[in-house]
Image (spheres, rainbow, N blue to C red):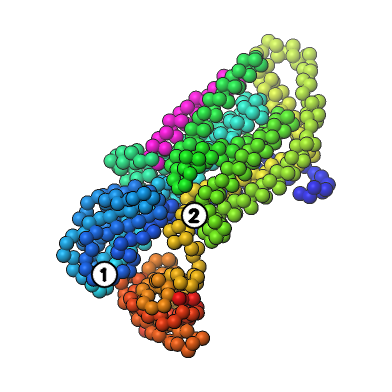
Amino acid sequence: MSATAPYAGPSPIRRPLAAAALLAALVSLVFGLLLAGAGPASAHAALTGSDPADGAVVDTAPKEVTLSFSEAIAVGDDSIRVLDPSGKRADTEAEPKDLSEGSTVRYGVALHSGLPDGTYTVAWQAVSADSHPISGAFTFSIGAPSDTTVALPSQEAGGGPVGVVYDIARYAAYGGFVLLVGGSAFVLVCWRGGATALPMQRLVVRGWLTLTAATLVMLLLRNPYTGSGKFADAFDLAGLQSVLDTKPGAALVSRLLLLGAAALFIAVLFGTYARREDEREKKDLTFGLAVGGGVVATGIAATWAMSEHASTGIQANIAMPVDVLHLLAVAAWLGGLASLLVALYRTPDIGSAAVRRFSAVAFGSVVVLAATGIYQSWRQVGSWSALTGTRYGQLLILKVALIAVLLAVAWFSRRWTGQLTDSAVASEDVAEEEPESESESVSADPERAAQLARQRAALTATKKKRIRDADPQRSGLRRSVLAEAAVAVVLLAVTTMLTSTEPGRTEEEAAGGTPSASAPAAGGPVNLKMPFDTGGQNGKGTVRIDIEPGRTGSNDLHVWIDGSDGKPMDVPELKLALTLESKDIGPLPVVPDRLAEGHWSASAVQIPMAGDWKIDVTVRTSDIDQVTIDKNAKIG
């Protein structure tokens, strides 16, 4: 709406159910799109190295295999498995040894002695310090590469149907927390009369029910989410006991206990407090509820801070209380916004004073969000390259843009709030006199008198609401608040997505401090991604090439081919050629050996001179379907 636009009449959305249906549809659309595009939760601890390295060929069998990670992880008996070319265990099957020193996180498993030559597969799965499951696999060879019957896992830890349900529960938990805390704060701070309003009671109670149900689902699914990925394991008592011994499990149990205290708070708020008429007693009870509710809300927010991003990485002791403040500010702002929307559409009694008080609360929440958000962004991103070159950074940019849009819409709401008055309803607050004859006729019939009283109350409420709906200032405020709520739904979804995405700082550290690119800087590893289409059936896919160390002399070259479904894809023939056109060198042919499904490798690939090399890749997917693609990369 333009700041100078004339009033265009009452809001077109007259009925509360229409507004509720619109918001519900928007919620479903946003979460559906996010879930469809998100895939499994990104790993928050990353594999930073291994010995032997991925694709390495060693002369003699090592005594152990070690893996290094970017942050602390939790491991079990089968967290690291080494499989020989036939698929049998080549490690001693003992619990991985903790070889960490200082800030270096490293685990190792011992191998059997006398291992034969061939290609070995290392598969690992663990839980990062911020509660998210991680997994992966790579290969190395003893003596020389060989064929292997081991198929690398196609599903990441935390993926599949269990991962989808767990992510939905995670989103629902944040939404329930916002409604529970924000709705309660709105009643206590902005509109005490809302304690007697049934729509406000329903909003807060539904927030509590949503958060409780989502927490129970997450607790039951925690074992299969971080392990087998099977729903049946949700009722494995041994697995549930192991979950309770972990930090995320303890956080979920603590949240359930605090929700018990929150249930008592809700009972007092909408029971004793709502019925209290003495102003002094009500003021004392307001203070007690505010203190008790604040403690419970802070405790619930801390269950996220103690088990997710804030609990690991740099400055964790500062980050956790900052994260709690951030969550409480989000709840006060967005939950209060939802409460105001419900009050404007479902109750006839909210006055201008309550709206202005919420405006002040929202302003304070935005100030807290800005301060805590800047700190969190610096801590989780750390550099401009991570802000623009990682998924976490891109989501963060989207979140900031949404906040800017929300603040712009809120500016219009503040304009309508400044013009809001209660004069239009004041005339309706005068009780209509009951006709004397009718009063005398029902005085002897208490049931009839009660029925008439209910009818008069309903009629009075309807007339109040009709006059309020016709008030242009109130109609304008409803429209702007509805727009705010629509943007807030998207903002909350994006904020929730950030909790299941690998922080930009961690992603860059795992990549060696350089952002991913199609052609890295000279003197470093070369990583290329090249889509192809041979034109035949199942002829589409992507070729990924790594050249290390990416300088003149001997290099190791690895090629992965992924099908259109993202899974490893085998092809009958794969050839490469390197050409330095500026010096008329090449093409230098490279024929890599197949290591595993969709994975080829070539050792000692000689790069005679630094320069801008053209890499040609020939892929044949059938007897007649073949294509050659190329891409340039600076090497040396």
Tag 2: residue type? Arg
Relative vertical location of residue 43 with respect to residue 416 in this rendering, above or below? below
Few, some or many C-alpha atoms within 10 Å of disc 1 (few <14, some 14-19, many ≥20)? some
Quadrant housing residue 189: top right
Q: Is most of the magenta stretch helix, strand or loop?
A: helix
Relative vertical location of residue 631 with respect to residue 177 in this rendering, above or below? below
Label 2's element?
Answer: helix
Which residue was labeled with disc 1? 58
Please tell me which residue is depicted at 33% across the width and 53% down the height of the picture. 106
The answer for how far apart the CA atoms under marks 1 and 2 are is 33 Å
Query: Does the magenta portion include 474?
Result: no
Tag 1: residue type? Val
Quarter of the figure with the C terminus: bottom left
The percent coordinates of residue 179 (x first, y second) are 56, 37
As rendered, which of 42 and 306 lies closer to the eye? 306
As rendered, which of 150 and 434 lies closer to the eye? 150
Quadrant housing residue 53: bottom left
Few, some or many C-alpha atoms within 10 Å of disc 2 (few <14, some 14-19, many ≥20)? many
Residue farthest toward the left in the current orientation of the protein? 114
The percent coordinates of residue 71 (x first, y second) are 40, 51
Which residue was labeled with disc 2? 505
Quadrant housing residue 458: top right
Relative vertical location of residue 216 with respect to residue 629 in this rendering, above or below? above
Instruction: Say whether residue 356 is left or right of residue 632.
Output: right
Q: Which mark is residue 211?
A: none
Q: Which residues are magenta?
A: 248-274
Instruction: Specify whether residue 421 is in view.
Output: yes
Please tell me which residue is depicted at 46% across the width and 76% down the height of the picture. 635
The percent coordinates of residue 375 (x first, y second) are 56, 46
Please tell me which residue is depicted at 50% across the width and 42% down the height of the picture. 319
As rendered, which of 457 and 322 lies closer to the eye? 322
Please tell me which residue is depicted at 74% across the width and 14% down the height of the picture. 439
